[in-house]
Image: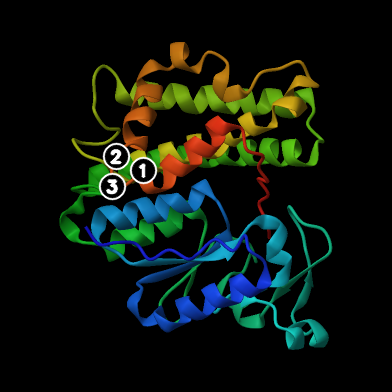
């Protein structure tokens, strides 16, 4: 199994961020795919988990959401220099998840037409890939053919795509919900839409694992399993906003009887979260979640 190259998460401010950027630049020619994102982000774990399973080198660059306004959004993403700030040449109006200005190069927007993160790039930066499922598919295509991650034949691949497509509606509703928790603009209608989307998605996963399947497609881990684990983990960040949920007199969507309603799906999540390809991402995340750390779940664009 090839180790995945991961950037240092730059919690230490601009100076540490610049040091981490220089270290990454020095080894840039070793990677198959570069991803720029806010961190931590369970959706980019789709790519890092897949990379561990199929021998692909992935480089992650980024910082916590509140720090990304102080980064240059580019293939060669890095903390803003004094010259960048002074020129204002890259300043763009922020949209979803941020107010004020973000700093995006023309090359970034040419490669990433929606201007959002996570943003993946080919090694030379000439090709941009966006949306977490597509980035994950890229990793599988770059990897060894015998990994089976993207199916053994056209039918299996199409079934995997079906699970990935089904995750998109769920992901959209869960993102709106998470943002409303962060901004404390949650309403009962937003909560109920998220709860309905969760129930529909989990019912499909439960049925996909019935009566006693070990994996969603075939007899080993595929992108369908990876996507499920990461989307569930992403929504579970709601548990770090208990006080906001209490103001509506509701429980977290993922804690409202999920274990009894979807026993196969929950067992699948718990099993895979300890797998050697998943644990480097899921382990620290679940430990922090259990400890009740606060979170900022912005999707920035």
CA separation in Å, label 2 and label 3: 23 Å
Instruction: Identify the residue at image location x=24%, y=47%.
Output: 151
Residue found at x 75% / y 26%? 243
> How far from the left and from the top, in percent, is residue 1?
21, 57
Residue 8 seen: yes
Q: Dot 2 corresponds to which residue?
A: 275
Place of residue 245 in the rendered image (x, y in percent of width and height, measured from the top left): 73, 24
Q: Residue 122 — which label? A: none
Q: Please rate how many residues cluster around mark 3, counting C-alpha atoms within 10 Å: few if below 14, some from 14 to 19, many from 20.
A: some
Residue drawn at 80 percent across, 27 percent down:
187
Residue in the image at 82% along x and 35% along y: 185
Q: Which residue is mark 3?
A: 157
Residue 210 in the image: state x and y as whole percent. Answer: 29, 19
Report the side of 24 relative to 191 (left or right).
Answer: left
Q: Which residue is mark 1?
A: 279
Question: Closer to the N terminus: mark 2 or mark 3?
Answer: 3
Element at label 1: helix
Q: Is residue 174 left or right of residue 250?
A: left
State how many labels appear. Answer: 3
Q: Is residue 126 left or right of residue 32?
A: right
CA gap between label 1 and label 2 equals: 6 Å
Task: Check contact, mark 2 vs mark 3: CB within 8 A.
Answer: no
Q: Earlier in the sequence, mark 3 or mark 1?
A: 3
Q: Secondary structure at mark 2?
A: loop
**Image quarter of the C terminus:** bottom right
């Amino acid at each position: 199994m090839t180790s995945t190259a991961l950037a240092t998460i730059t919690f230490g401010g601009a100076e540490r961020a610049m040091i981490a950027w220089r270290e990454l630049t020095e080894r840039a020619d070793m990677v198959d795919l570069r991803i720029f994102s806010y961190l931590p982000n369970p959706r980019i774990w789709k790519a890092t988990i897949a990379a561990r399973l199929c021998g692909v080198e992935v480089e992650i660059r980024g910082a916590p959401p509140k720090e990304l306004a102080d980064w240059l959004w580019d293939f060669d993403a890095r903390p803003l220099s004094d010259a960048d700030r002074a020129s204002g040449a890259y300043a763009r109006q922020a949209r979803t998840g941020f107010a004020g200005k973000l700093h995006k190069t023309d090359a970034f927007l040419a490669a990433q037409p929606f201007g959002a993160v996570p943003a993946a790039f080919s090694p030379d930066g000439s090709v941009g890939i966006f949306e977490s499922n597509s980035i994950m598919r890229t990793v599988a295509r770059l990897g060894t053919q015998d990994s089976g991650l993207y199916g053994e034949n056209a039918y299996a691949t199409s079934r995997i795509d079906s699970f990935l497509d089904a995750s998109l509606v769920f992901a959209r509703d869960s993102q709106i919900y998470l943002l409303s928790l962060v901004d404390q603009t949650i309403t009962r209608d937003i909560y109920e839409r998220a709860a309905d989307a969760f129930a529909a998605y989990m019912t499909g996963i439960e049925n996909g694992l019935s009566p006693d399947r070990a994996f969603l497609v075939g007899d080993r881990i595929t992108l369908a399993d990876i996507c499920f684990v990461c989307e569930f983990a992403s929504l579970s960040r709601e548990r770090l906003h208990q006080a906001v949920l209490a103001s509506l007199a509701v429980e977290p969507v993922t804690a409202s009887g999920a274990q009894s309603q979807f026993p196969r799906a929950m067992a699948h999540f718990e099993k895979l979260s300890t797998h050697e390809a998943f644990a480097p991402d899921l382990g620290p995340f679940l430990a922090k979640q259990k400890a009740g750390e606060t979170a900022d779940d912005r999707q920035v664009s």
